[in-house]
Image (tube, helix red, strand yellow):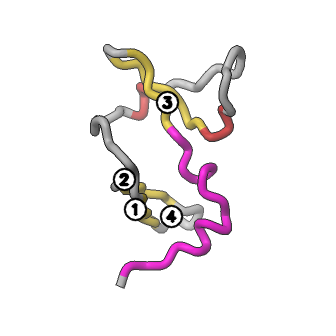
Amino acid sequence: MIVFDIINPDNTKTIIAATVDMVKDVIVINQQNIKPVPELGLSYDSRFIQGAVRTDEGFILLLDIEKILSNKDLANIQPLQ
């Protein structure tokens, strides 16, 4: 399971949990280490990529969860009881 903290336009927080098949690693990333993804030469749709972080093993692409989930998806999120 992956948990996302989303800050809403009104500064409230929405926490979303998503079930995943596998988590390889958990790391802490400093905001200043996130670099923009270049548009040239990509073989994938970069609209859903928030940025990239260089590590010792290569690059990690950071997904933009707000763009992956549609507004309809976000509107259907139900609070935990």
Q: Position of residue 48 (x, y in %)?
A: 62, 40
- The answer to which of 23 and 7 lies nearer the viewer is 23
Q: Which residue is mark 3?
A: 61
Q: What residue do we see at 45% from left, 65% from top?
A: 13
Q: Which amino acid lies under the numbered mark 3 shown in the image of this protein?
A: Leu
Distance in Å between CA atoms under marks 4 and 2: 22 Å
Q: Position of residue 72 (x, y in %)?
A: 67, 68
Q: Which amino acid lies under the numbered mark 1 shown in the image of this protein?
A: Ala
Range of magenta residues: 63-80
SS at circle 4: loop
The residue mark sitting in front, 4 or 3, is 3
- The answer to which of 13 and 71 lies nearer the viewer is 71
Q: Which residue is mark 2?
A: 2
Q: Which residue is mark 1?
A: 17
Q: Quadrant of residue 64?
A: top right
How packed mark 4 is, by other alpha carbons closer than 10 Å (few <14, some 14-19, many 20 or more), is: few
How packed mark 3 is, by other alpha carbons closer than 10 Å (few <14, some 14-19, many 20 or more), is: some
SS at circle 3: strand
Q: Position of residue 28 (x, y in %)?
A: 29, 36
Q: Quadrant of residue 45?
A: top right
Q: Which amino acid lies under the numbered mark 4 shown in the image of this protein?
A: Asn
Numbered tag placed on residue 34 in the rendering:
none
* 47 over 67 or under it: above or below: above
Mark 4 and mark 3 lie on one chain; the one further toward the N terminus is: 4
Distance in Å between CA atoms under marks 3 and 2: 16 Å
Mark 2 and mark 1 lie on one chain; the one further toward the N terminus is: 2
Q: Which residue is mark 4?
A: 11
Distance in Å between CA atoms under marks 4 and 1: 19 Å
Mark 3 and mark 2 lie on one chain; the one further toward the N terminus is: 2
